Amino acid sequence: MFSTRYLSIHDYCLRSLSDILEHHYGTKSGDQCNRMLDKLIAAEIAIDRIAEPDDIETVHFRNLRNAWYHEYALQRTPTEAMAWRIVQAYYTVLCSLSAMVRSHVENITKPSHRKMLRLYMDYFLCHSIRRKLLFPPTNIYLSNDLVGAEDTSNPYWLKRYDRIKHGLEWARKWPYLEGVEVFAVPHYLLALREWVNYEDAYLFFMLYGPNPRERLVRSLNGITASYLTEAEYYLIQRYGWGAVNLQFTTFAYHLKDKQRSSSPELENRFDVYARVLG
């Protein structure tokens, strides 16, 4: 039961996403952020600059702060409640890409998860220019076939992309996503969240031993960090370092001074941004 419903689909898919991330960006969070920034800067994609108003409560920045909150919750959810980590990972990714979309479309009528994912596809993943700001594995999507796969002449990487494709094909069958034509990693995480919430959460009590748990933790951490880095970089380029750093310092102040806590993952990324982009 656990093997057929989790290991044979989701463990393979999530592990393959993690393998691709570590292949391109390394295994440590600081190294990953540095290497992603190197690629983003080297892409030399012009991002329209907008003067940010004095109001820090703009909808795109609220979405960004929500992404930070969900990342914080993800990192502090115990591994005994691993299913809830999947839920937090999905919302971290959703809010990250929502921040990017909302920087272009502030007023979205009747917003929904499906609509936000569709707008992300339109404005970024399938956009002829902005797509170049996305790198493996966030640039992968499934239409008639898998788009964005690299190094497929190598059997090792071909197998990993096949496993990702299998995961996206599983998401395509999910009832909530009926009618969606193009599937990407956020669609997969949405379907995985639905499955975890409503069908098989108790299966995660069967994550016996350290290896399945460690693989899942590693995968979720890497996936969320990649979407956050792309969103943070995009908003820094669009609104300026000062505007985004103000969001970070405000968030960190409430977390540290009011909650007596911290978010090391977020702080590490902003140390990199301050050095490279500040």
Image (spheres, grey):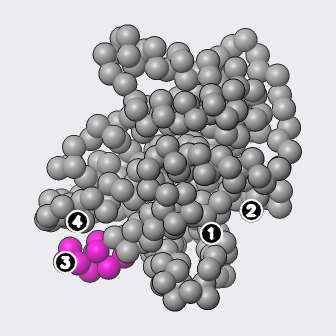
Q: In the rendered structure, which amino acid carries the disc numbered 3?
A: Met
How far is the residue under mark 1 from the one under mark 4? Answer: 28 Å
Residue that carries the numbered disc 4 in the rendered image: 211
Q: Earlier in the sequence, mark 3 or mark 1?
A: 3
**Residue 99 visible to an observer of this rendering:** no
Tag 1: Cα neighbours inside 10 Å, few (<14), some, or many (≥20)? Answer: many
Magenta-tinted stretch: 1-9
When the figure is inspected, residue 185 is found, relative to residue 225, above or below; the finding is below
Q: Is residue 273 rendered to the left or right of residue 238? A: left
Q: Earlier in the sequence, mark 3 or mark 4?
A: 3
Whether tag 1 and tag 2 are in contact, CB under 8 A, the answer is yes
The local secondary structure at tag 3 comes to: loop
Q: In the rendered structure, which amino acid carries the disc numbered 2?
A: Cys
- Picture disc at residue 141: 1
The residue at 86%/45% (across/down) is 46
Whether tag 3 and tag 2 are in contact, CB under 8 A, the answer is no
Q: Earlier in the sequence, mark 3 or mark 2?
A: 3
The local secondary structure at tag 1 comes to: strand
Foreground disc of the pair 4, 2: 4
Residue that carries the numbered disc 2 in the rendered image: 126
Q: In the rendered structure, which amino acid carries the disc numbered 1?
A: Tyr
Tag 4: Cα neighbours inside 10 Å, few (<14), some, or many (≥20)? Answer: few
Whether tag 3 and tag 4 are in contact, CB under 8 A, the answer is no
